[in-house]
Amino acid sequence: MIFTLGINHHSAPLAIRERVAFGADRLSHALADLTGSGAVKEAAILSTCNRTEIYCAAESPEAAIDWLVRYHQVERGELAPFLYTHDQPEAVRHAFRVASGLDSMVIGEPQILGQMKDAVRAAEETGTLGTQLHKLFQRSFSVAKEVRSTTAIGANIVSMAAAGVHLAERIFESVASQRILFIGAGEMIELCAAHFCAERPQQVTVANRTVERGRVLADRYGGTAIRLDELGEHIARHDIVVSCTASPLPIIGLGMVERAVKVRRHRPMFMVDLAVPRDIEEEVGELDDVFLYTVDDLAQVVESGLESRQAAVVEAEDIISQRVSDFLVWVQSRETVPVIRSLRDAAERTRRHEMEHALKLLARGEAPDKVLEQMSQRLTNKLLHAPTQTLNAAEGEGRAELQAAAARLFHLHTGE
């Protein structure tokens, strides 16, 4: 059976997610270790800044949970409140939703699909991706493509972070060539960082009151961390500033930005203030070459995309439900494979035995037409002996069920 277990941004805070994350350089070793005991037959690990999930084929998820706790040296009781476990069909639905961006921090974002493909590639290279998970992920990628091509799931801005990127692209030709300064290291800045950094900016800096916490976020995107009291020295070097702290008073004043604009020689500066109360003094927005947007400004951009996006989410969920049903039909068909293989093996043994018998008769000079007639009769009798004997021995309801099954299996018409 297929299981999915893990934690994500919905279920666990960053402090917990960090403790069970897997770096790319550790994935191969982790996968080999997870499947080494044999309790987990197939496995893939998806580890991003927002989630750590194990997809596995096993008798139960307990072995994978025990391994996750042991591998990261965390107490099971610490992890348990944040851990979710899905079996079929929810495990399948979850994989399809993740691939389609419906379970992401930014609904509909495409980056997760690439991250899932990387996870599958790592499992293939390590040799832990078997028939069931291979099929699951191939179907996941197919569903994601169908959702994105037939709905408007990725067409509209639906988060403050996405709206920020959208507005930044109005000011700059490309976010990729800009230097970004994030002020704060809380959940909103984490979301903004995920979205802005998906555009691969030239430089990332995180300013936070606790520089250690800022460094955790900065390291995730190959950036640097500074203290809040160093803002005045660094702000002029950045083209985009995104701020969201819990400060009761503004931390960026008019004078600081005026000096920065002068140093920048009037190159434009894009600023987003998502804090309530504001982090950036209102007067900053009146400066030439400064484009300041508040949480209310971004809310208007988000609002314009919500209605069509909500309809797209409903459409996407309908598609996923249908594809989950299709996948479960495939899973059920796999359950008959051993029986079919055994049936064919038995028939093949009978065929070979009768062929050898017929060749011996021909070698002795028997007439070919008689040998063929005898071989066909012997094959028919041997192949039908077991089912005929079982039908004759059956009684009551069992007999009626066997008769119906035989009629379906052999496409018989038993009516007069």
Image (cartoon, helix red, strand yellow):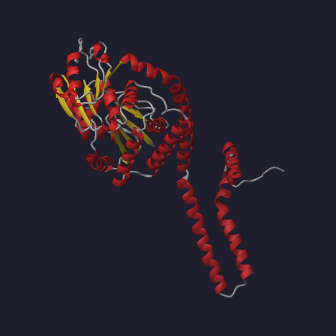
Q: Count the labels in the image.
A: 0
Give the percent coordinates (x, y) of residue 78. 26, 28
* Nearer the observer, 218 or 314: 218
303 relative to 43 in the view: left or right: right
Q: Quadrant of the N terminus?
A: top left
* Vertical arrangement, residue 395 with respect to residue 151, above or below: below
Give the percent coordinates (x, y) of residue 235. 21, 26
Q: Is residue 93 visible?
A: yes
* Nearer the observer, 331 or 283: 283
Q: Residue at x 40, y 38 (%)?
A: 112
274 relative to 228 in the view: left or right: right
188 relative to 412 in the view: left or right: left
Give the percent coordinates (x, y) of residue 254. 23, 16
* Vertical arrangement, residue 104 with respect to residue 114, above or below: above
Give the percent coordinates (x, y) of residue 331. 52, 46
Q: Residue at x 71, y 70 (%)?
A: 377
* Vertical arrangement, residue 89 with respect to residue 126, above or below: above
Q: Residue furthest bottom?
A: 365
* Nearer the observer, 163 or 357: 163
Quadrant housing residue 183: top left
Q: Is residue 74 visible?
A: no
Q: Residue at x 39, y 16 (%)?
A: 296
38 relative to 155 in the view: left or right: left
* Nearer the observer, 76 or 152: 152
Q: Residue furthest right?
A: 416
